[in-house]
Image (spheres, rainbow, N blue to C red):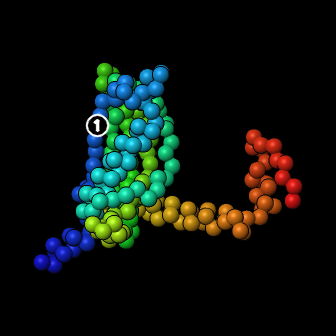
Amino acid sequence: MIMSEKMKQYKSVEESQVSMSLLMTPVNSNFSGKIHGGYILGLMDQIAFLCASKHSGNYCVTASVNKVDFLNPVDVGQMLHLKASVNYTGNTSMVIGLHVETEDIRSGEIKHCNSSYFTMVAKDDDGNSAKVPGLILSSKETIRRFARSVQRQHETKVRKENFKPSEFEVKDYMELLEGHNLDLQFKD
């Protein structure tokens, strides 16, 4: 009985991992045969939802997306492989790490397209935020990913505090603007 209660409180990364592979077809491409980034983002949101819902046992919603860099284009006719894992658990939220690759089905060449982090919040049947199971950290990699999520949250908080409109001082950032493509016409 004690063991089953503990298992409900915490889950391993592997218990919630999700992957999917899809053939990229012309219906989601632009005029040059490349798959629209918005379509890929939609797939990433779906797999993040699946992973978070599997971990929490609840319906989940996307709270934020942290940095999506499209590193390589996705061509019509390629396989798109998406992998999602829970990297961090808070009280009601989870950070889902996403890794996206393409595979040329003729040559077998695999290219990394992007990685991203989706913050998902679990919801109960009434639409209220629901508590999520904690995460079992059992390897150096799971600890690294959890710590990275904690660090990212801290950096976001600091950035928000530094750039509050009511407390922003232009003089403190003038040096930061030097060397950039701008025409500064600000008069204090």
Disc 1 residue crowd, few under 14, some 14–19, many 20+, Cα 10 Å: some
Residue at (46, 26) in percent of width and height: 30
Task: Identify residue for label 1.
Answer: 21
Q: Look at the numbered disc 1 and give the secondary structure of its residue.
A: strand
Residue 134 shows up from this direction: no
Q: Is residue 152 or residue 181 the one in the foreground?
A: 181
Q: Residue furthest front?
A: 126
Residue 25 shows up from this direction: yes
Residue at (75, 40) in percent of width and height: 181
Q: Position of residue 77 (x, y in %)?
A: 34, 24
Q: Amino acid at mark 1?
A: Ser
Q: Position of residue 48 (x, y in %)?
A: 35, 51
Quadrant where the N terminus is found in the figure: bottom left
Q: Is residue 159 or residue 61 the one in the foreground?
A: 61
Q: Position of residue 62 (x, y in %)?
A: 40, 56
Q: Residue furthest right?
A: 187
Image height check: is 15 above or below 115? below
